[in-house]
Amino acid sequence: MKLIREFERESERQYTRGNIKGFLHVYNGEEAIAVGAINTLRPDDYIVTHYRDHGQALARGMTSNEVMAELMGKATGCSRGKGGSMHLFSSDLNFMGGYAIVGGQLCIAAGIALAVQYRGDDQVVLCFFGDGAVNEGEFHEAMNLAAIWNLPVIFFCEHNLYGMGASSKETLVMWDSLHEMAAAYGMSRYEVDGNDILEVQALMQKINAEVRSGKGPAFVVARTYRLRGHSVADPADYRPEDEVDYWAGQDPIPRFRGWLTDEGIATVEDFEEIDASVEEEIVVAAEFGESSPWPESASLYDDVYTDRPTEGIPA
């Protein structure tokens, strides 16, 4: 969780320096979800996620170097510099991409789960999305098909109370009981404190076993909060001050550190060692990204068409 937090802080610095272009959506405040959920998966399970995907990619095992390089559009990035912040991908890790279209990844996840079922395998597919995606038609299409076909997919909603700048209280009639929407599809449904890594982990271990055993899809809603705006360019001044203050006190990193200290599992010295290690890794990642080469123009059509054009490629 500390690695994700510091990676995101560094990505913000690189964005303000002009080394990261376009939009940048950071994961600050939601780290317990990615770490708690993804670390319960097997290496051959699949993950599909949204465009706030840096945290999930790092939790899955992508290196800080390749993620930072991708954010900077460099050839050494996980998507060879062609995806950027919103399209991290690794076939080696079965990390099947961040998606920039809100809700679009849900149907992709259902399709991957259908392929798993068709092959007779026992992987599960974990699909992350935000509460803003619940208003999209793809959400209901994917939930319905997954239920009809009994697909091995876990739909995981990161309910951070806002879809971009719109409060879920104003856009979702069931904003305070979002998990109950799955009742319409006869699907197992759960709600969890998304800022409590141990609670997330325990619930996901249970759900993984059920879905893997053939009991069908599941729907999870994790209550959480992004400590930054929708994107780095969003000042988030639409959020009430008392709400921001409350959720700052629910920050998953100090909460978990407090628990580790109270249980006698870790000491201040342990945390200082972790912090120093993370800081060193982030410095290396930033230097790696900045020093990496841009993609060659000759690679423009790679991974787009089966038969790559041989003429008209810019010099």
Image: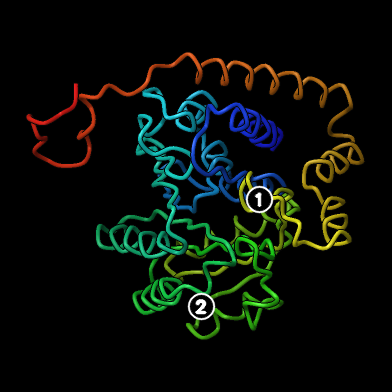
Q: What's the residue type where badge 2 is placed?
A: Met
Q: Nearer the viewer, residue 310 or 90?
A: 310
Q: Residue at x 32, y 24 (%)?
A: 295
Circle 2 residues within 10 Å: few <14, some 14–19, many ≥20: many
Percent x, y of residue 307 = 8, 38
Q: Is residue 52 left or right of residue 83?
A: right
Quarter in which the N terminus is drawn: top right
Number of labels in the image equals 2
Between disc 1 and disc 2, whose residue precedes? 2
Q: Which residue is mark 2?
A: 187
In percent of the image, x 69 and y 36: which residue is there? 5
Check disc 1 and report its element: helix, strand or loop.
Answer: loop
Q: Is residue 51 left or right of residue 158?
A: left
Residue 218: image x %, image y %? 52, 69
Residue 78 location in percent, x, y?
41, 31
Please name the residue that numbered disc 1 is placed on: 234
